[in-house]
Image (cartoon, rainbow, N blue to C red):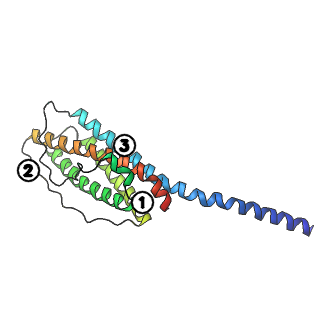
Amino acid sequence: TSVLLDSSSSLLFSLLLAQLPVFTSASPVRRSSDLDKLSNQTKNLMKLTQELLKEHAFDSDVESHRFRSLPEMSNRSANDLTNLELKPTLSQLHADLKLYEHHFEWLNRVSKKHHHPAVPKLMEMIREMKSLISLLNRQMQRIEAPKLPSATPSLPPHLPFHFDVLQSSHELLQHFKLFCDWAYRAFLSLKPKASAVQ
């Protein structure tokens, strides 16, 4: 019987050893889904932005000069996505989102004063943005990506008329839609690199 016990024990041990590669290989797959969460959250934000733009569309062109501290989007093209580096890109996206957060919180305060109908959806959008920032922050901590210094937003001093609020919200939303589109593609292209790191 002792021989049988030894052989069954060794068989069990062999089976456990055989399972080890499965357990270890499963870990990066689980963690790489963080980039999926980031891209999905960004997609949700883009959808909210588009809905707000549709609800408060303008017939005429909006002057785009009210916000001088928004992240620069003209130097980011789809062609650059394959060359993105993981840590610097996540750090930059985090800094950009924090800047947008300041702008949209300001817009929310101003919109409340003017009883703007978009306030509920704007608040939902800010909640989604904070959630995305928190998720991105966790991913950065995991791969030890540095946080960039926070930029000081340059905001319009005073919006006396309802029309000014509408124009400002339209400009911000248009700019943020471009950012979300680029960020969504960036998260997707970074997914294989994040898997390799983790």
Q: How many marks?
A: 3
Could you say which disc has been placed on residue 158 in the image? Answer: 2
Distance (Cα) linking label 2 and label 3: 31 Å
- Left or right, residue 11 beside residue 155: right
What quarter of the picture does the N terminus occupy? bottom right
Local SS, label 2? loop
**Residue labelled with disc 1:** 139
**Residue labelled with disc 3:** 44
Whichever of labels 2 and 1 marks the residue nearer the N terminus, that label is: 1
Q: Splitting the image into 4 quarters, where does residue 165 fall? A: top left
Whichever of labels 2 and 3 marks the residue nearer the N terminus, that label is: 3
The three-letter code of the residue at mark 3 reads: Asn
Q: Residue drawn 30% across and 58% down?
A: 92
Distance (Cα) linking label 3 and label 1: 19 Å
- Most distant residue in the left direction: 160
Q: Residue drawn 38% across and 57% down?
A: 136
- Left or right, residue 113 beside residue 52: left
